[in-house]
Image (tube, rainbow, N blue to C red):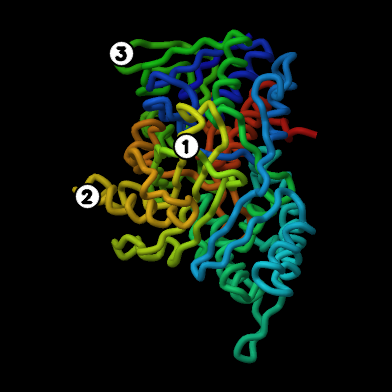
Amino acid sequence: MARIAVIGAGLGALASAARLAVAGHRVTVYERTETYGGAVRRLERGGFGFDTGPGLLTLPAVYRDLFVKTGRKPLEECVELVQVDPAARHVFADGTEVALPNASRAGVVAALDEALGAGAGARWGDFLVRAREAWDRTRRPLLEEPLWPDWQVLTGQEPYPAVPHKRLLRTRRAGTLAEIGAWELRDPRLAALLDGHALAYGLDPGTAPASAAVLPYMEHAFGTWYVRGGIRELARAVYERCVERRVEFVFGAEVVRVLEKDGRAAGVELAGGAMAEADLVVGTGPFRLAGLAAGRELYGAGAVRPVPEDRRPGRMVVCLALRGAREPGAAHRTVVHGEGGLGPFREGLLPERPTVVVDRPDDPALRPDAEHESVVLTATVPAATEYDWAAPGAADAFADRLTAAAGRAVPGLGERLLWREVRTPLDTERETGATGGAVPPPALAGPGGALHPANSTDLPGLFAAGGWAHPGGGLPHAGMSGALVAGLIVEGPEFRGSQ
């Protein structure tokens, strides 16, 4: 039995802690804040509740597997999973609207044909077939296996089978999502539908590789799910599973250094000088982890190297408390499509019409009574090191634009608004420690793809879990990260992933 110190209580760290405890190890989690969950938080005020992190869950099989492997009660006995339908309603810039059914290719094709015109559904359906091929090519190495030592093969060839496109006497193939939209989907609204999936993961459609087509495919193929009571309930269930497995938690304990002895990780030092010895250490994002390891090189030449976290975008979240009941048949999620993606931010400007995700859960646990409603608005924005969210009026000015956009999805929003809470990447940084409040994207293959550093490091006994390590960001990816770290510790370097 090894003593294992885990830095942070995000979902990736919790997933690894539960699995390691079941394997017989003595696990202690050191979390600098006073609660668990990382970015999976809840804001509560005046009887209203709001998920301030992810609003829906994809690939619930990741957490089903976690609960099967760590205890008697399956996931569904610990939380109530609800498959939302429609998966989302979309409001496009030209006023066109369409509601897309959950996990139904035929239903999606029919809905798009009716809303956008004959042929639109077929083009999107054909795109999903190609996206599935990219998914089949990359799923196992990117999600289920430790990062390959020869990881360069994952970025050498584009896994998305783009359709040849003739342009100016040349035949080209789409290399970015924006090019897929222009050359294959051939409708600005379908392109916006694709762009919205990229933005939701913090990716700019203009630079995101074509392989990012796996993101809409993943949601289409496996559905989108809501956890009754809010996604925070998933974090609670994983935390409680850890407690059941006798994982020890120390909250308000900031780790300032990874201890090293005889060339191995040997524990952690806490703010205030206390030392906690351990045989193994599971750390947080590799970029921050290098600082905790006294600047020691954790990834050698030829490895995927950590990059500063603040090069990735963050998220703005606006929580709206509304008077009046939610209208019957309202969609759980509406995406109000704007214009410009992240482009205006590169010039230091706020987009006039941002793309906004509007979540309206029909959940009594998140409202004072049936005559009120809680709504969460989310938009992808630059990290706090790229845009001054603390400047007077900056956050409220952009929140005004999000709220105005949401008015296209929520009837009578302006008259119903009681109050709002505005959260910027500065809040994310405070809660998660991520530099600038950036949010990690998932790993993507192909040229221009974003891979994350491996879960094992060059310091023996030190491992990295969570969204900034392989296989990247997102709730399912965090759970898979925890599974990979546990596998590497329990089975050793020969571990090759789940079978």
Q: Is residue 213 above or below residue 1?
A: below
Q: Residue at 76% across / 52% down in the picture?
A: 104
Tag 1 residue: 373
Q: Kindly identify the amino acid type of the residue bearing the numbered disc 1.
A: Glu
In this rendering, position of residue 162 left or right of residue 398:
right
Residue nearest the viewer, comparing 91 with 237 = 91
Q: Which element carries disc 3, helix, strand or loop?
A: loop
Quadrant occupied by the C terminus: top right
Within-10-Å neighbours for mark 2: few <14, some 14–19, many 20+: few
- Residue 114 location, x and y as percent? 70, 68
Q: Are marks 2 and 1 in contact (CB under 8 Å)?
A: no
Gap in angstroms between the C-alphas marked 1 and 3? 47 Å
Residue nearest the viewer, comparing 205 with 225 = 225
Tag 3 residue: 273
Q: Is residue 237 above or below residue 340?
A: above
Q: Kindly identify the amino acid type of the residue bearing the numbered disc 3.
A: Gly
Among numbered discs 3 and 2, the one appearing first in the sequence: 3
Q: Kindly identify the amino acid type of the residue bearing the numbered disc 2.
A: Gly
In this rendering, position of residue 78 left or right of residue 291:
right
Among numbered discs 2 and 1, the one appearing first in the sequence: 1
Within-10-Å neighbours for mark 3: few <14, some 14–19, many 20+: few
Gap in angstroms between the C-alphas marked 3 and 2? 40 Å
Among numbered discs 1 and 3, the one appearing first in the sequence: 3
